[in-house]
Image (cartoon, helix red, strand yellow):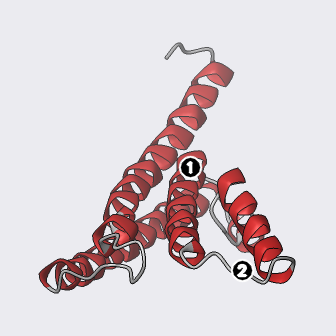
C-alpha cells in the first residue's frame, strides 16, 4: 500500500512539476491496486469482518440467527465460486490471446491472476470464520454449563 501511495505521489509530482509523466505508472498502479484489494479481502474474510447487515440478524432468536448466518455464508461462498468460474474464463481468454500491458509488457495473467487465488482463499476463510465463530460459541456454552471442551 505504501508503494502504491508513493508511486501515485511521485507520478503526480512528475506530471505537474516537471511536466514529465511516468508512462508506466498506470500499469503498475493497476496491478498493485488489484493485488492489495483482493489480498485485503482475504484478510477481512478470515476475521469475519465483511459487510453485513447485523441490525436484522441480531434481533432474531438464537436458532434463527445461527441459521441466517449460515445461509449468508453459503450465499457468499456460492457468489465467490461464481466469480471464480467467470474469472477463470476471463483469464483463459487473456492467456489464449497472450495479452500484455502496452508499456511494460507484463502479461495480464500476472495482474488479474490474483482473482482466482483470492476467491479460493476467501471461500476457505469464510468457512473458517463461521466454523471458528460457532466453535467459540459452543465452547462458551459448555463453560456456562460447567462442561469441558
Query: Toward which corner of the image does residue 51 lie, by quadrant?
Result: bottom right
| Mark 1 surroundings within 10 Å by alpha-carbon count, few (fewer than 14), some (14 through 19), many (20 or more) | some
- The residue that label 2 is drawn on is 20
Q: Residue at x 71, y 52 (%)?
A: 2
Question: x, y (%) of residue 50?
Answer: 62, 62
Looking at this view, name the residue that lies furthest to the left. Answer: 96
Instruction: Describe the element under mark 2 as helix, strand or loop.
Output: loop
Q: Earlier in the sequence, mark 1 or mark 2?
A: 2
In the rendered view, would you say 28 is above or below 42? below
* Depth order, front residue of 72/28: 28
Question: x, y (%) of residue 105?
Answer: 34, 73
Asked if the residue under mark 2 is in contact with the one under mark 1, i.e. CB atoms within 8 Å, the reply is no
Question: x, y (%) of residue 7?
Answer: 69, 63
Q: Quadrant of the N terminus?
A: bottom right
* Depth order, front residue of 142/105: 105
In the rendered view, would you say 141 is above or below 35? above
- The residue that label 1 is drawn on is 43
| Mark 2 surroundings within 10 Å by alpha-carbon count, few (fewer than 14), some (14 through 19), many (20 or more) | few
Task: Report the Cα–Cα distance between label 1 and label 2.
Answer: 37 Å
Instruction: Describe the element under mark 1 as helix, strand or loop.
Output: helix
Q: For marks 1 and 2, give the one nearer the viewer.
A: 2
* Depth order, front residue of 36/7: 7
Q: Residue at x 57, y 78 (%)?
A: 26
Q: Residue at x 53, y 13 (%)?
A: 148
Question: x, y (%) of residue 82?
Answer: 31, 78
Query: Toward which corner of the image does residue 113 lie, by quadrant?
Result: bottom left
Amino acid at each position: 500500500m505504501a508503494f502504491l501511495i508513493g508511486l501515485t505521489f511521485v507520478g503526480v509530482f512528475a506530471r505537474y512539476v516537471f511536466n514529465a509523466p511516468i508512462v508506466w505508472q498506470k500499469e503498475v498502479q493497476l496491478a498493485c491496486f488489484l493485488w492489495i484489494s483482493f489480498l485485503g479481502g482475504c484478510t477481512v474474510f478470515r476475521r469475519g469482518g465483511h459487510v453485513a447487515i447485523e441490525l436484522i440478524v441480531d434481533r432474531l432468536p438464537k436458532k434463527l440467527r445461527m441459521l441466517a448466518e449460515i445461509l449468508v455464508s453459503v450465499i457468499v461462498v456460492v457468489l465467490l465460486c461464481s466469480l471464480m468460474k467467470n474469472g477463470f474464463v476471463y483469464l483463459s481468454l487473456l492467456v489464449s490471446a497472450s495479452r500484455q500491458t502496452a508499456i511494460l509488457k507484463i502479461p495480464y495473467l500476472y495482474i488479474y491472476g490474483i482473482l482466482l487465488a483470492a476467491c479460493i482463499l476467501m471461500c476457505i476463510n469464510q468457512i473458517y470464520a463461521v466454523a471458528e465463530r460457532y466453535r467459540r460459541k459452543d465452547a462458551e456454552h459448555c463453560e456456562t454449563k460447567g462442561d469441558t471442551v
